[in-house]
Image (tube, helix red, strand yellow):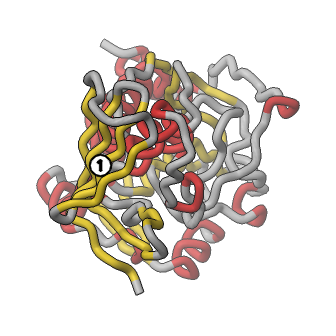
Amino acid sequence: MSVLGELSNDCRFEKIIVIGVGTVATNCAKLIKEKNLDLLFIESRNDNSAFAKNFCEKNRIDYLQLDKEALTNLFLNLDTATLIISVSNRYLFPSSILSKSNITVINYHGALLPKYPGRNAEAWAIFNNDKVAGITWHYVVEVVDAGAIITQKSLELTSKVTSFSLLRAYSKMAFEAFVEIIDQVLLQTVDVIHQNFNERQAIKYSWQKPNDGQLDFNWSSEAISAFLLAMDYGPLQVLGLPYFYFEDEKYEFSKYKIVEELTTLDNGTLALLNNELVIERNNFKFILSELKVVE
């Protein structure tokens, strides 16, 4: 039994709000619901998801879908001690909300802060050939992803991990970490770790992509592999389709294959045949397929 299950009267918050999308958000909401706390689940209109709405109806959790202005008004009008749990949430909390003494906000971030603040951190970890990556739960302050760290979990990156597969691993890790720390958060007994701002990196925005989405044929085999894996969000296509230039034409491609084998062609050889581009370099063969000429 959790500490809170035994000492529920000691919870420092009268209301809990989960705002966000995805299974991490709904799993967090379900755990809070099991603690018999006053709970509200919110999605912004930009994140409209039948999955979350159906989940809330099934589990008898209050649900709202609000635009940015309505969200701000709701938060500003809160007058009870409230914990807001932000998960894959696009709403940025303004100082007018964060300065309210009755509101505490925590957030799940897909990187080992202070590395990779901002969006799509998993892609940057792969593109930069990081050996270790992970997730962070932290308190929210006005500067994006700069608040005190509640907990972190890490894993080793393999040479085959994609942004999509890393997101899936992160989802499991994030909820496991939430289970471990939520009672401390609710009881306000967290022993936080303050970020070292000397190690903080520039914020990445949603429109930024590794090398602006362009594959460079001058890269090493390791760099080409890292780029392809970083751009690969599977069906989500978070960063859109990657592209390259070949003989003065711009091509987008939606599929690729990385094969490690002894090459028969000279390193750096390119071959375009049957709507596929083959790159052979350093005992790696990269096959880019489903090509489309971009005007």
In this view, 61 is above or below 196:
below
Q: Is residue 87 visible?
A: yes
Where does the image place residue 98, in percent across and percent down from the top left? 72, 55
Where does the image place residue 67, in percent across and percent down from the top left? 48, 79
Residue projecting furthest to the left: 58
Residue projecting furthest to the right: 198
- Residue type at mark 1 is Val
Where does the image place residue 206, in percent across and percent down from the top left? 55, 62
Q: Does residue 4 appear left or right of residue 83 in this picture? A: left
Q: Which residue shows up at 43% across the image and 76% down it?
A: 249
Residue projecting furthest to the bottom: 295
In this view, 4 is above or below 206:
above
Query: 165 or 141, which is in the foreground?
Result: 165
How many marks can you see? 1
Q: Is residue 108 visible?
A: no
Circle 1 SS class: strand
Query: 278 or 289, which is in the foreground?
Result: 278
- Image-quadrant location for residue 170: top left
Q: Which residue shows up at 30% across the image and 28% down it?
A: 263
Mark 1 packing: few (<14 Cα in 10 Å), some, or many (20+)? some
Q: Which residue shows up at 43% across the image and 22% down it?
A: 157
Query: 166 or 281, which is in the foreground?
Result: 281
Q: Does residue 208 appear left or right of residue 26 in this picture? A: right
User: Which quadrant is the N terminus positioned in?
Assistant: top left
In this view, 77 is above or below 212:
below
Q: Which residue shows up at 56% across the image and 52% down it?
A: 210
Query: 272 or 41, which is in the foreground?
Result: 272
User: Which quadrant is the C terminus positioned in?
Assistant: bottom left
To which residue does mark 1 refer? 278
Where does the image place residue 33, in percent across and percent down from the top left? 29, 41
